[in-house]
Amino acid sequence: MEYHEYFQEIALRLNRNFDVTKDVQILGQSIQIFAKSEIHNESYFGSKNLKLWRAENFEYCLIQQVDVITEDQIKQFQLFLTQAVDYFVKPHSEHMSSMITGVIVTKHFPKELQEMIKQFKYRKSFNLSLKGWADVRCLAVDLHSNRVISNKKGKEVQQFYLPFMDRPKKKMAWLIKK
């Protein structure tokens, strides 16, 4: 699979729940796909004038193409993701959580660098979590071998970023002849 095919496929997948922007500059980094999702939950008592609580959840996806991956590039990308937390997350009393998902897309991801992705962990609490928290997912997509390497938090979305996602097979009992 080529880069442009993968980016088209991922943009289509993200487009259902995210606002997707292509080819942007964020914190000096060139990002091929930037996607943002905001979810607001509220509970009312009687009418909408009597709000009991409100919680806001945000997710930001930053997908970057890297032709040849090195240890320094992974370190820079992970530093970029931690800086993105401060750039995007604006904590306030109704902020519950923010998720930064960083994805490196490459033709070949060396096995010796996989541990750098798997061991990466970053979580930031705001005001003892009273104003929410932010987590970072770090993933690497290997287009050649059709696999995704991720940190522990990234396992939640690992299947989503597979280049060739296994489609669920529909049961078509009516086609089966007895």
Image: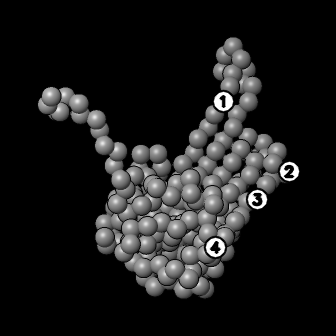
Looking at the rendered structure, the secondary structure element under dot 2 is loop
Q: Distance between the residues labelled 3 and 1?
A: 24 Å
How far is the residue under mark 1 from the one under mark 2? 22 Å
Q: Which residue is depicted at the point 49% across and 82% down?
A: 110
User: Which disc number belongs to residue 42?
Assistant: 1
Occupied quadrant, residue 38: top right
Give the amino acid at mark 1: Glu
Which-is-in-front pick, marks 1 and 4?
4
User: Does residue 136 appear anywhere in the picture?
Assistant: yes
Q: Earlier in the sequence, mark 4 or mark 2?
A: 4
Residue 49 coordinates in the image, percent (x, y) = 70, 21
At which x and y percent is residue 29? Answer: 55, 75
Q: In which quarter of the image is residue 101?
A: bottom right
Judging by the rendered image, the residue that carries numbered circle 2 is 128
Q: Residue 54, position in %: x, y?
A: 70, 33
Which residue, given by chain and number where applicable, does mark 4 sit on? 78
Camera-side residue: 32 or 122?
122
Q: Which amino acid does label 4 sit on?
A: Gln
61 relative position to 135: left or right: left
Q: What residue type is labelled 3?
A: Lys
The residue identified by callout 3 is 124
* Residues under numbered marks 1 and 2 in contact, where contact means CB atoms less than 8 Å apart: no
Q: Which residue is drawn at 80% across and 53% down?
A: 126
